[in-house]
């Protein structure tokens, strides 16, 4: 018998969920399953490598000689619109000292821009400083899903796999608490919260 649990999720920090198209943003099931696999491995790193691989293949599926279908499916529904980060909001608070350029020059950069390094470029703004040097500004080159947007995460599985799904729920909990989706998650981007954790999964 098939069972589906729906999680209503709300984005907390800008989510840079990239695609094959430069600068675009898309939230896809494989990315979510990959994040769940990462946290599942983190939770089970104490297992002998052989046991770890066997258990992982049983839950997440395998390829090659060990081909096996995943024990659960992930689907995402949303009407979110990807936009460039609102530059004015990112500039409201603080500076982070000096940050070295490749050429050896230095400049001040907003702490949030610093944490999103790689998602923007420094571009000539068409003006010059009194000393004749070019004035440059941070310009974002990748869209993101902004905070407060919501998406529906659906996880479907067979009730025969109920026991093994417990570790998937634990991985999901870690993903929400300590990780995120998309790139720059180590810097705090892509965080989201689940608004409707089922009582049966609260442990």
Image: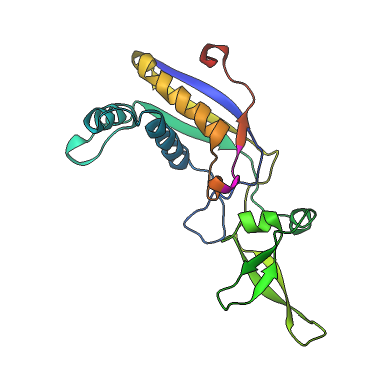
Direction from residue 45 to residue 186 in the image, left or right: right
Is residue 129 depicted above or below 63 in this figure?
Answer: below
Residue at 49% x, 28% y: name it: 172
Determine if the magenta segment contains residue 190: yes
Q: Is residue 84 visible?
A: no
* Magenta stretch holds residue 49: no
Residue drawn at 67 percent across, 53 percent down: 83
Residue at 40% across, 35% down: 37
The residue nearer to you, when weighing 185 against 66, is: 185
| Residue at the extreme top of the image, as rendered | 200
Residue sticking out furthest to the bottom: 132
Q: Residue at x 53, y 11 (%)?
A: 200
Left or right of 162 on screen, residue 79: right
Which x, y percent locates residue 150? 65, 35
Magenta extent: 187-191
From this view, report whether residue 19 is shown above or below residue 121.
above
Q: Main secondary structure of the magenta part?
A: loop
Task: Residue at the far right: name it.
Answer: 130
> Quick check: 35 left or right of 127?
left
């Amino acid at each position: 018998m098939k069972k589906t649990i729906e999680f209503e999720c709300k984005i907390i920090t800008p989510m840079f969920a990239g695609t094959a198209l430069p600068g675009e943003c898309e939230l896809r099931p494989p990315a979510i399953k990959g994040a769940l696999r990462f946290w599942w491995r983190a939770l089970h790193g104490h297992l002998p490598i052989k046991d770890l691989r066997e258990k992982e293949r049983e839950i997440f599926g395998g390829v090659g000689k060990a081909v096996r279908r995943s024990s659960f499916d992930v689907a995402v529904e949303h009407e979110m619109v990807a936009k460039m980060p609102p530059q004015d909001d990112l500039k409201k608070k603080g500076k982070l000292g000096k940050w070295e350029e490749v050429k050896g020059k230095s400049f001040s950069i907003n702490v949030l821009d610093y944490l999103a390094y790689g998602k923007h470029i420094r571009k000539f703004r068409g003006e010059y400083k009194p000393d004749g040097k070019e004035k440059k500004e941070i310009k974002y080159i990748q869209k993101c899903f902004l905070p407060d947007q919501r998406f529906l995460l659906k996880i479907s599985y067979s009730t025969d796999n109920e026991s093994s799904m417990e570790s998937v729920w634990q991985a999901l909990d870690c993903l929400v608490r300590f990780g995120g989706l998309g790139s720059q998650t180590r810097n705090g981007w892509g965080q989201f919260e689940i608004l409707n954790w089922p009582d049966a999964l609260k442990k």
